[in-house]
Image (cartoon, rainbow, N blue to C red):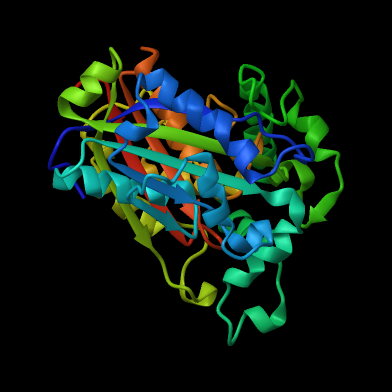
Amino acid sequence: MRRTREVAIVSFAQSPSVRREWARDDVELLLPVIQEALGQAGLRKEEMGFTASGSSDFVTGLPFSFVLALDAVGAFPPIEETHVEMDGAWALYEAWVRLSLGDVDTALVYAFGRSSLGEPRDVLGMQLDPYYVAPLAPDAISLAALQARALLDSGRATERSLAEVAARSRRNAKANPNAQLSGDVLPEALLDAPYLVAPLRRHDCPPISDGAVAVVLAAGEKARAATARPAWIRGIDHRIESHGLGMRDLTRSPSTALAAANAGVGQGSVDVAEVHAPFTHQELILREALGLNGDVDLNPSGGALAANPLMSAGLIRIGEAARRVMDGSARRAVAHATSGPCLQQNLVCVLEAAP
């Protein structure tokens, strides 16, 4: 879907991702992040025309946890609010649609995920087809390993190329104070590690992370007043592939390619791309689907391999890309978010410095 009204991201804040957030509940995790995002934009919560959030009760292990989290926003006096039971990137899409309609000028989007409260690889299995696949109880890492094996067997990747993705991710994450995993490590050393679920090793998989994120969207003159260099959303689109894993080629992501075409990724050079690839082999699949060449600065934050708070990591990718447009280190950036097993759902967003 292409823009119908000038809408931009004007601020972005996130919490440091940690293995386990013991001291704070969801509201206490979200509150400082939301306050920071509003403060960056010079706006008060009363000035938000719309509020959208993303989280999962399955991840938190608590029914209607998103309602409890509204205490971080302050829902009285009454606000216009919505929630998606998936990554916050899709909440941003809903907010962008609302601003594009023209009846509100600002929106707050936030997401949170406390993956440490359960076993994410088992919890994510609840997304599977309930009749044929879920009864077999495959976990998320085993399904990703099937996808990785298919990619290796296709001849388009090797175990070394997967290790190179992990090594670059951790090296890039050294400059990200919110990353959970970072450091210098050689691909050869990573290949010496034992398999977690063959052909995936632990470094091929995301860490278990707790964290939160918030962004503020604004339209037209509101955006220009909020920041000197808004990250204008030039195109955004999301597509879905078949629920049946056996009905699609797991080594490719046609839904990402279609979303990228509809968002206009190929209509200009790309300086920075933040790609939501929780597993190393998925970055290779997404790079191909998005048509990114070797000149693109790919996942300078370290990506989801460095920090992966569920339901937040996709929105963080959009925020990280927007931050680089806003601080002047990129003129044009691409952000991607995924949800579901083996890259089932994919969202692509193009951000530019000029409206």
Q: Say if 350 sits above or below 168 in the image.
A: below
Residue closest to the far bottom: 131
Please name the residue shown 35% across and 24% down the image.
43
Please name the residue shown 30% across and 30% down the image.
351
Residue 152: image location, x then y, percent: 62, 54
Q: Quadrant of residue 265?
A: top left
Q: Say if 62 sits above or below 106 in the image.
A: below
Does residue 332 appear to the left or right of 6 in the view shown?
right
Q: Nearer the viewer, residue 321 or 84?
A: 84
Residue 104: image location, x then y, percent: 20, 41
Q: Say if 349 sits above or below 174 in the image.
A: below
Residue 285: image location, x then y, percent: 49, 49
Does residue 19 appear to the left or right of 124 in the view shown?
right
Q: Is residue 138 visible?
A: yes
Please name the residue shown 53% across and 45% down the image.
71
Please name the residue shown 74% across and 22% down the image.
183
Q: Quadrant of residue 132?
A: bottom right
Q: How many numbered circles does the render carry?
A: 0
Residue 211: image location, x then y, percent: 63, 39
Does residue 122 appear to the left or right of 277 in the view shown?
right
Image quadrant where one finds the C terminus: top left
Q: Is residue 142 visible?
A: no
Residue closest to the far front: 77
